[in-house]
Amino acid sequence: MKQVKLFAVALTLLLGISLTSCLNTESDPIVTVPVYGECVNYYPPTFSMASGQQVVLSGTTETFTPGNMYFFYFQYDSTQQSAEAESITGTLYAGSTASDLTAKGSEGPISESSYSQANAPMFALSGYISVIYGGAGNIEPFVGFDNKWLFLPMAYWIKVVSDEDEQKIELDKHTFVLTYNMDEVKNGDTELVLTLNHVVADGSEENVERKSSYYAGLKAYNLSYAIYAFQGKAGVKPTRLKVVTKTNSSNDSLDGATESVWSCDIKD
């Protein structure tokens, strides 16, 4: 299994990045920037950044889903377009591809149930980590795009196998379900509590040992309905978000796992 490089750049910088930020030299007019963007049009592929600025991709055959959150490296000619323009057209960097960060619909946020309860820990939720596959660096959840999107780092334990197809099967067993319990919300409450559940779909006859720590990057959860449901019970929008999950940086077991909590203000 190939190692992936852990993002060491703070999410607050990436999500708020300006298209004046670049990876080029002063003499090179081609500007390259990392982009987190919500797809707002599939053709031409158009993405809205947290700043409200839009980027349009040309020359790509990739298919994009409106409403989903993507990450990609974007480049454009700064002699032809202003970095301050409301919309900038460019290409994917050097033949690279875009990553769809969007959590599957079944991963929530949804109401908690017995089917969504964690049966495995996360490696960590935030802070400095060092993993076998992914390297070392700081990970941190982040809320952006006017509190619409929650970005969670996915660090967990996996089984590593040499066969590429078998490795994909192993990774596909892992889902990360974000749940809430609106029955606990009272009128006037202001804190929305979400639980991140790591669910592994092993067969009943399987006894899989997972000894390799792995950082898979970010997963983006759309908070719109959870906030709507909370407001319906509390009478007000939440002003604070709390994410709770079980973590174990020693082994892949809930035995000995601890409760990790991350929170932030989400005021308008």
Image: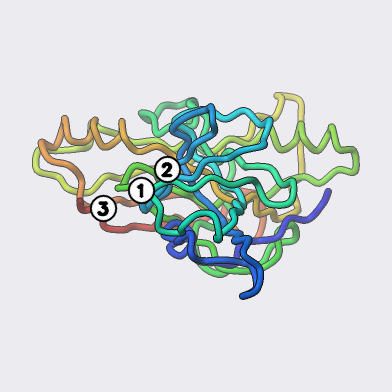
Q: Nearer the viewer, mark 3 or mark 1?
A: 1
Q: Is residue 235 above or below residue 160?
A: above
Q: Secondary structure at mark 1?
A: loop
Name the amino acid type tagged 1: Gly
Q: Which mark is residue 14?
A: none
Name the amino acid type tagged 3: Ile
Residue at 52 percent of width and 41 percent of height: 56
Residue 173 at x, y percent in the picture: 67, 32
Q: Name the foreground residue: 163 vs 49.
A: 49
Q: What's the CA distance linking mark 3 and mark 1? A: 18 Å
Residue 199 at x, y percent in the picture: 57, 35
Q: Is residue 27 above or below residue 187?
A: below
Residue 154 at x, y percent in the picture: 58, 49
Identify the residue under disc 3. Answer: 266
Identify the residue under disc 2. Answer: 48
Residue at 67 percent of width and 55 percent of height: 251
Could you tell me if the residues under marks 2 and 1 are in contact, i.e. CB atoms within 8 Å? yes
Residue 58 at x, y percent in the picture: 61, 38
**Picture quarter containing residue 213?**
bottom right
Q: Secondary structure at mark 3?
A: loop
Residue 69 in view, yes or no: yes
Name the amino acid type tagged 2: Ser
Q: Is residue 246 above or below residue 67?
A: below
Q: What's the CA distance linking mark 2 and mark 1? A: 6 Å
Q: Name the foreground residue: 211 vs 161.
A: 161
